[in-house]
Amino acid sequence: MATPDFIGKFTANNPGLMTLQGTNQYIVGKESGLVIDVALSADSNMDGIIEQAEAMGVKKIEKILLTHIHSDHTGGALALRKRCGAKLGIHRSRKGYLGGEDFQYDDNDVLDFGGGELKVLHTPGHESGHCCFYEQGDKVLFSGDNILGYGTAVIHPPDGNMSDYMKTLERLLGFEMSLILPGHGPLIGKPEAKVREYIKHRMEREQQVLGALRANRNTIGDITDAIYVDVSAALKRVAEFSVQAHLEKLERDGRVKKEAGRYLLLSDN
Ligand SMILES: [Zn+2]
């Protein structure tokens, strides 16, 4: 499905290993509108967002919403708020985090964007206050960093939580979606298949972690080496966070216990 004409995108110039081509900043609205995520405070970034809004016929940016607090999504939020006189919102759990928010939102709140509404879904996993926004008319999900255009989301403990993340993915399957617009990477035209692929990938990883534990690999480093062969040093660090996140989930599930930095398998079924 093509992106509906009340949704526009301006990708920030912050490409990288974690940000892919850069952070996608979305403009949603008709005559007035809102912006989801602002990565950079540079004038060129704000100009890009405002020009995109004008090209859509959005004369006033009324609100700024944040999917989560990581700096590649919030770095320009206060600057754009000041420039446009927009009201800045953030998840209730992150009240005061940027020091200039005007309102908070929480799960199931409905936010008006001048021509339609977005439903707030509190979707912890990548970050504990993470929110997705769901446009019910055209069934579009703004997924932030919980689902990316390609690759997988990073779950970085302690704030990133694999148990929460798996629940979030399962919950998203309950929404009818025609399109996912992610925080990084290209749009996702087959939403349900993508979410199912994400769930399958995590379940396979969990099995790999259990397999490594059965083979008496007991530290995060050792387990990572067993599972991830041929990764660069930079990605290795990310892989270790992922392994840690899986181990913490298995601990919560009562299948693993941690003792003096080593992870031990408790039950094996
Ligand atoms: Zn991000």
Image: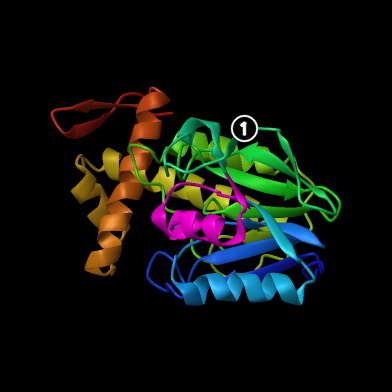
Q: Position of residue 123 (x, y in %)?
A: 57, 39
* For residue 179, above or below residue 8: above
Does residue 233 appear to the left or right of 149 in the view shown? left
Is 142 in front, or is 57? Answer: 57
Q: Give the residue drawn at x 42%, y 41%.
A: 99
User: Would you say residue 21 is visible in this rendering?
Assistant: no
Specify whether residue 136 is painted magenta.
Answer: no
* For residue 228, above or below residue 128: below
Does residue 136 appear to the left or right of 164 in the view shown? right
Q: Which residue is identified by label 1? A: 106
User: Would you say residue 31 is visible in this rendering?
Assistant: yes
Residues in magenta, as a range? 64-88
Does residue 82 appear to the left or right of 16 in the view shown? right
Q: Position of residue 215 (x, y in %)?
A: 25, 43
Mark 1 surroundings: few (<14), some (14-19) or many (≥20) residues within 10 A:
some
Does residue 144 appear to the left or right of 181 in the view shown? left
**Badge 1 amino acid:** Asp
Where is the C terminus found, in terms of image quarters?
top left
Q: Give the residue drawn at x 50%, y 45%.
A: 203
Is 243 in front, or is 208? Answer: 243
Q: Position of residue 150 (x, y in %)?
A: 54, 67
Image quadrant assignment for residue 8: bottom right
Q: Position of residue 199 (x, y in %)?
A: 57, 47
